[in-house]
Image (tube, grey):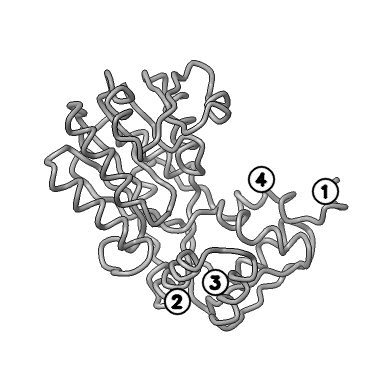
Amino acid sequence: MILVTGASGTVGKAVLNEVARSGAKHKAMYRSADEAVKAPTGTQTVITDFAKKETLAATLRDVDSVYLVCSPIPDLVQLESNMIEACLAAGVKHIVLNSALGAGDYAKSFPSWHRKVEDKLKSTGLPFTILRPNSFHQNVVTYFAPSIRAQGVFYSSMGNAKTSYLDVRDIAAVAAKALAGGEHSGKTYELNGPEPLTYAALAEKISKHAGRPVQYADIPAEARRNAMLDQGMPAWQVDALLDLQDYYTSGNGGTVDQLLPTLLGRQPITMDRFLAEFAGEFRSQAASA
C-alpha cells in the first residue's frame, strides 16, 4: 500500500490524484477531517500530524511506500525526520522524498533544510527516491495572480534571471512511478521544466493568454522585503524567500535537460499550456465574472 502525505498541499494533492488514477492500493494523510473529505473516491484517509509521533505507527500500518512532503516551515527537518524514523520502525520498503532544487549545493534557505532531511533519510538505509523540483507553474498563480488581477503588474527582484518552471502534475507523475521503486530506487532526480523564462518573458506569456496587458516590475530586494513584511509575512519566511531568490538570480534556476521528459515518457506541460488552462486566474474580477 502507498501512503501519500501532505495530501491537501499543492504537490501532495497532485500525487494523490495520480496514485488514485493508477488503481494502486493507497491511503492519504491529512491533518484535519475537513480536508480529508475532499479525497478522491476510493481513497482511504487518515488524520495524522507529523509532530505527534505516537500517531505515526498506526498511520503506517500495512504501508509499503511513502510519498513524503511537508510545508516549507522552520520545523520541516524535525517533522519529516519524525516520519522517516516511524517508517524505519514500521518496516516501510521505500520513501519518495519531495525535496527542492538546490538541496545538493545551496547551504541557505529551504534547500538547506531539505538537504538535512535527505541526509537523514540516507543514513537510515531505507530505499529512497529523492525529487528536487524547480519552481512550479502553479506558483505563478499563487504569488503573481493577485496583483495582476488588481493592477496588471507583478513584482519581484529577479532581474533577467531565468527559471525553468514545471507543472506539479508532472512532478506527481514522476512521484507515482517512483513509488513503485524498481529502477528509481536510490536515485536523486533534479527536475527542471521545458523552457527557461525571465520574468519579463513570463509577463508576455501571461498577457497573451489572459488577453490583457501584464507587466513585470523589477524592484530592489530591500523593497521586496519591506513589502512582504508589510503584508504580515513572518520574518523567517521573508529571509528564506530572499535567500532562495539569491540562488535563482545567481543563474541556478534556468537549466533545461531531458531528464523530465525521459521519466515521463512524454513532453512536459509547458508554461503556455498551463497559462491557457488557467488564463482566468489573471483577469480582473469584472472580466472573469
Disc 4/disc 3 C-alpha distance (Å): 21 Å
Q: Residues within 10 Å of mark 2 (few under 14, many from 20)?
A: some
**Residue found at x 21% / y 38%:** 85
Quarter of the image containing the C terminus?
A: top right
Q: Amino acid at mark 3?
A: Thr
Disc 2 element: helix
**Residue found at x 42% / y 44%:** 171
Residue 182 position by quadrant: top left
**Residue found at x 40% / y 78%:** 250
The answer to whether residue 51 is above or below residue 78 is above
Q: Earlier in the sequence, mark 2 or mark 4?
A: 2
Q: Which residue is mark 2?
A: 249
Q: Residues within 10 Å of mark 3 (few under 14, many from 20)?
A: some
Q: Amino acid at mark 2?
A: Thr
In depth, the one of 196 and 106 nearer the eye is: 106
Disc 4 element: helix
Disc 4/disc 1 C-alpha distance (Å): 14 Å
Q: Which residue is mark 1?
A: 288
In depth, the one of 258 and 187 nearer the eye is: 187
Q: Position of residue 133 (x, y in %)?
A: 39, 54
Residue 244 position by quadrant: bottom left
Q: Amino acid at mark 4?
A: Glu
Mark linked to residue 277: 4
How many numbered markers are drawn? 4
Q: Position of residue 277 (x, y in %)?
A: 66, 45
